[in-house]
């Protein structure tokens, strides 16, 4: 029975891991210097050459990369391989105009799928499992990543993609799905729908691999109870490959980062200073094995804590806590990345003023997004049909920009409270 478990890597000594990281980092810096003029310039601005980076202890000298760099260098500016060597593109969900896109060579896809396979095996996954992948497919990395990992483990893979709950449940029952991969909010919804249909006892699920958005321990218990499974967290981001950058083991106490591929640092988001282990700060990744899109010191904006305390599962790779928030204003709604500025852009484009409020909530374990928008005095109309028409137009424009449904409520001019300080435009009622 094949198990995609690599104890010689995942349980390697700290010295061994550091030795790999030192060698791979030095090579990667040289590679980026030689092939990515954008980053070379950033290094030159700091007076650095590859000779200055002799190992992980010098990592802190390198300049950071941010989402803004990715947008500036869009689409090819950070590519380190000729396009003819690239075989895949993935993209982040719901970002404005210039999306963040990542390129992959076949080697990059292989290493990404390895990482996802490790995550599946950490839940006890084997080739006897039926792996039901309900993350979205397409540009989003969730579906393709877990799909590839599932193949590697040898599971029977169900590439369900998201939506169509009726069909999801039917396949789950008919084919005896044992592992479910989707966002935690969709897992909670599936649990509820299974209960409503009285088919909870017909499910053979035993594990779930849930990520792409923040979820609490309470939600974990609810999903575990609702589906009769053990629920594992998985983390990742498109820029660094996708899901599987880190994953939970049987301890369900922090996610092991695949340190043979990614070096993690925690920094103070305000000063950029590297913080000691155990301190809370912004997570930064350097990918040391990727070919096409190797980002050095990429600021994720996710706030978390790293721990090197031994884990009883035997894995030695450092663990990250669940992200506790973001150092920017990005919201994750139903697994989709949403920036309030995108909403404002749509409103202004449609002729509204910037008097609005974004209300995010979680109802029945599913995120909801409502936008209350003040009509301008010129638009104000008490004819309900007209208001409904205007609301519909905004819903469509927002859907086109964000990729998700937002309920729109037009309200009378001057009815949204004005603030004397910063405008309170966002009310996030989700308890996470
Ligand atoms: O969400 C990749 C992914 C797919 C991860 C499926 C896990 C499962 P992006 O769309 O680029 O990629 O969004 C990345 O999502 O910076 C975090 O803020 C957030 N995020 C991802 N996983 C988790 C998690 C995918 N387990 C952004 N917990 C990241 C909390 C998460 N937040």
Image (cartoon, helix red, strand yellow):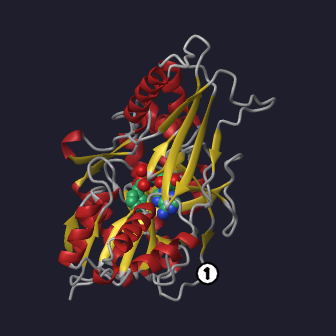
From the viewer's perspective, tell me whether residue 209 is left or right of residue 17. left
Residue 374 vertical placement versus 276 (above, below):
above
Is the C-beta of the residue carrying label 1 under 8 Å from the nearest atom of ligand 1?
Answer: no
Would you identify the image quadrant in which residue 34 lies? top left
Residue 251, how many percent across, how many down? 51, 84
Residue 302, how many percent across, how many down? 57, 54
Q: Nearer the viewer, residue 160 or 124?
A: 160
Would you identify the image quadrant in which residue 417 lies? top right
User: Looking at the image, how many numbered discs can be counted on the residues?
Assistant: 1
Residue 113 vertical placement versus 39 (above, below):
below
User: At numbered mark 1, what does the secondary structure look like: helix, strand or loop?
Assistant: loop
Residue drawn 27% across the image and 53% down it: 137
Q: Quadrant of the N terminus?
A: bottom left
Q: Quadrant of the C terminus?
A: bottom right
Q: Which residue is disc 1 drawn over?
A: 309
Residue 295, how many percent across, how many down? 44, 49
- Residue furthest to the right in view is 420
- For the question of whether residue 247 can be seen, the reply is no
The crowd level at tag 1 (other Cα within 10 Å; few <14, some 14-19, many 20+) is few
From the viewer's perspective, tell me whether residue 380 is left or right of residue 418. left
- Residue furthest to the top in view is 378
Residue 172, how many percent across, how many down? 25, 73
- For the question of whether residue 374 can be seen, the reply is yes
Q: Nearer the viewer, residue 316 or 232?
A: 232
Q: Nearer the viewer, residue 311 or 415?
A: 415
Residue drawn 69% across the image and 22% down it: 414
Q: Nearer the viewer, residue 275 or 47?
A: 275
């Amino acid at each position: 029975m094949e198990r995609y478990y690599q104890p010689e890597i995942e349980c390697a000594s700290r010295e061994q891991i550091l030795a790999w990281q030192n060698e791979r980092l030095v090579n990667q810096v040289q590679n980026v210097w030689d092939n990515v003029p954008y980053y070379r310039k950033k290094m030159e601005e700091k007076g650095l050459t590859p000779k200055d980076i002799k190992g992980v202890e010098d990592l802190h000298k390198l300049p950071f990369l941010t989402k803004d760099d990715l947008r500036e260098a869009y689409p090819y500016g950070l590519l380190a391989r000729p396009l003819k060597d690239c075989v895949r593109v993935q993209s982040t969900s719901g970002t404005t105009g210039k999306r963040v896109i990542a390129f992959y060579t076949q080697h990059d896809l292989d290493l990404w799928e390895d990482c996802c396979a490790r995550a599946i095996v950490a839940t006890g996954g084997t080739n006897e499992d039926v792996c039901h992948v309900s993350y979205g497919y397409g540009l989003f990395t969730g579906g393709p990543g877990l799909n590839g990992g599932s193949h590697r483990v040898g599971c029977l893979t169900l590439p369900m993609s998201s939506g169509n709950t009726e069909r999801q449940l039917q396949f789950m029952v008919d084919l005896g799905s044992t592992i479910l991969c989707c966002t935690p909010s969709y897992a909670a919804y599936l649990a509820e729908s299974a209960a409503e249909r009285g088919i909870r006892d017909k499910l053979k699920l035993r594990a779930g691999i849930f990520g792409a958005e923040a979820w609490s321990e309470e939600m974990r218990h609810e999903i575990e109870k609702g589906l009769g499974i053990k629920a594992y967290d998985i983390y990742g981001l498109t820029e660094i490959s996708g899901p599987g950058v880190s994953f939970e083991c049987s301890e369900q106490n922090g996610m092991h980062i695949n340190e043979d591929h990614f070096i993690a640092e925690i920094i103070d988001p305000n000063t950029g200073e590297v913080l000691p282990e155990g301190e809370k700060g912004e997570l930064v990744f350097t990918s040391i094995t990727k070919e096409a899109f190797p980002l050095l010191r990429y600021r994720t904006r996710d706030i978390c804590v790293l721990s090197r305390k031994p884990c009883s599962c035997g894995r030695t790779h450092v663990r990250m806590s669940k992200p506790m928030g973001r150092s920017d204003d990005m919201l994750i709604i139903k697994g989709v990345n949403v920036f309030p500025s995108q909403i404002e852009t749509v409103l202004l484009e449609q002729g509204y003023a910037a008097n609005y409020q974004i209300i995010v909530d979680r109802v029945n374990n599913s995120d909801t997004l409502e936008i209350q928008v003040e009509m301008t005095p010129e638009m104000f109309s008490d004819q309900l049909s007209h208001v409904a028409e205007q609301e519909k137009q905004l819903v469509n424009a927002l859907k086109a920009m964000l990729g998700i449904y937002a309920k729109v409520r037009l309200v009378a001019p001057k009815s949204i409270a004005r603030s004397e300080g910063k405008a309170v435009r966002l009310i996030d009622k989700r308890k996470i």
